[in-house]
């Protein structure tokens, strides 16, 4: 089986690539990535020499290139993760999100459809999406697979749009698809623009911790390796044409999460308890900030038996340890362009 993973040099993609390369020596895994600021081949150093792994550098918006690789490798299955993925960046440059997340997804769908035409036997287009397509919850309730889409940020609107196109290709062309909508991931190799790695890096460097608004926004956090396990399970056992929500059963208000992170960091850095918490600074809120995300993951739990394997405290501790032990990785990704982004975003 030839499997194309897009965005495999990014955060979640690299964990998916590693899992598939190591667990399924008979599958040929092709990792297609444009290596944007978020893509990093260092994430896959340990598996880059495996015989069932190939890296292809390229952009999913490049139609000629995408048709040429489908022509050359006849991918039986696609796991599509490549995306612009950060809400704050989508607020500054929405069009970049339409280009990659909507048009890039369309180009992949077309290449897949044109390769297999009407013979989709044992083929699959698996689209990785987010719970943010559902919009925001109030204090109560959970997102189920039946919750209607109501995206509020350019990022979530672009992901919602690509989800709709995938579904539409299923209805119109019988294209065999799966979509999963997952909650906030955290773990090793996440680019330090997202809350947890950004704050870990700032604590290491004694820089302030910019909490947006009053900090009472809530997210449901899932350890990235548990997300990769869920993707593996759904890839093999999911019902074609279905969508599945994936979540951590693990809601945290941002400010409570940040306080837990500060406590664990003080302990690991041998700093007196309370040191890191003094770095917290409440800053201007994000426009259109969704109040609360929370996933009802009972479908994947009941149908496929999946549940998270680590508690949040364990996962967070593993994550911090990884960043503390991979200082070079962190230094490399926070030099150059990152400094400019940081200045612009946090001024
Ligand atoms: P990421 O930003 O860490 O990685 C994205 C990867 O895609 C990078 O390697 C980048 O180089 C590549 N890429 C970007 N534009 C590309 C293009 N035009 N052509 C080819 N490659 C391109 O993102 P992530 O956090 O790993 O997210 C992966 C997927 O999972 C995304 O589709 C995202 O919407 C979804 N998702 C993320 C989360 C989360 O919490 N991070 C939660 C749910 C769903
Ligand atoms: P983020 O990691 O960007 O993920 P998402 O916006 O996709 O949920 O943000 C998680 C939460 O943390 C969100 O409520 C915004 C908040 N946040 C801050 O308070 N400060 C920050 O510097 C960042 C990046 C996020």
Image: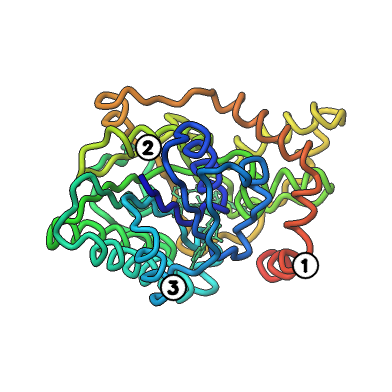
- Mark 2 and mark 1 lie on one chain; the one further toward the N terminus is 2
Q: Are marks 2 and 1 in contact (CB under 8 Å)?
A: no
97 is higher (above) or lower (below) than 144: below
- Residue 65 is labelled as 3
Q: Are marks 3 and 1 in contact (CB under 8 Å)?
A: no
Q: Secondary structure at mark 2?
A: strand
Q: Secondary structure at mark 3?
A: helix
201 is higher (above) or lower (below) than 105: above
Residue at 29% across, 28% down: 298
Q: Please provide percent x and percent y for residue 150.
A: 30, 57
Q: Please provide percent x and percent y for residue 74.
A: 33, 58
Q: Which residue is mark 1?
A: 336
Q: Are marks 3 and 2 in contact (CB under 8 Å)?
A: no
Relative to residue 66, is residue 200 drawn left or right? right
Relative to residue 167, is residue 106 drawn left or right? right
Q: Please provide percent x and percent y for residue 307.
A: 40, 25
**Quadrant hosting residue 261:** top right
Using the numbered discs, state the Cα–Cα distance from disc 3 to disc 1 in whole angstroms. Answer: 29 Å
Mark 2 surroundings: few (<14), some (14-19) or many (≥20) residues within 10 A: many
């Amino acid at each position: 089986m030839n499997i194309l993973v897009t965005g495999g040099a990014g955060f979640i993609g690299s964990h998916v690539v590693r899992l598939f390369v190591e667990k399924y020596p008979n599958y040929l895994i092709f990792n297609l990535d444009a290596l944007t600021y978020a893509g990093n081949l260092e994430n896959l150093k340990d598996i880059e020499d495996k015989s069932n792994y190939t890296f292809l550098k390229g952009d999913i918006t490049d139609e000629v290139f995408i048709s040429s690789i489908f022509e050359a490798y006849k991918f039986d299955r696609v796991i599509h993760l490549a995306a612009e993925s950060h809400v704050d960046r989508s607020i500054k440059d929405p069009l970049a999100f339409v280009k990659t997340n909507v048009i890039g997804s369309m180009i992949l769908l077309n290449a897949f459809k044109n390769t297999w035409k009407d013979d989709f036997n044992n083929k699959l287009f698996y689209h990785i999406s987010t719970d943010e397509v559902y919009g925001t919850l109030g204090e109560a309730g959970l997102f189920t697979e039946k919750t209607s889409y109501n995206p509020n940020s350019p990022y979530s609107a672009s992901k919602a749009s690509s989800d709709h196109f995938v579904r539409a290709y299923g209805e119109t062309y019988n294209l065999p698809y799966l979509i999963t909508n997952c909650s906030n991931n955290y773990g090793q190799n996440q680019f330090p623009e997202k809350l947890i790695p950004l704050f870990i890096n700032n604590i290491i460097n004694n820089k302030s911790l910019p909490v947006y608004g009053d900090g009472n926004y809530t997210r449901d956090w899932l350890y990235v390796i548990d997300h990769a396990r869920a993707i593996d399970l759904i890839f093999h056992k999911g019902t074609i044409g279905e969508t599945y929500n994936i979540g951590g059963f693990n809601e945290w208000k941002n400010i409570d999460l940040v306080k837990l992170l500060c406590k664990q960091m003080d302990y690991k850095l041998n700093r007196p308890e309370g040191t890191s918490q003094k770095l917290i600074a409440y800053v201007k809120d994000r426009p259109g900030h969704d109040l609360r995300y929370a996933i009802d993951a009972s479908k994947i739990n009941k149908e496929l038996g999946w549940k998270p394997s680590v508690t949040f405290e364990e996962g967070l501790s593993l994550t911090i340890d990884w960043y503390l032990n991979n200082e070079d990785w962190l230094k490399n990704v926070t030099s150059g362009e990152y400094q400019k982004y940081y200045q612009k975003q946090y001024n």
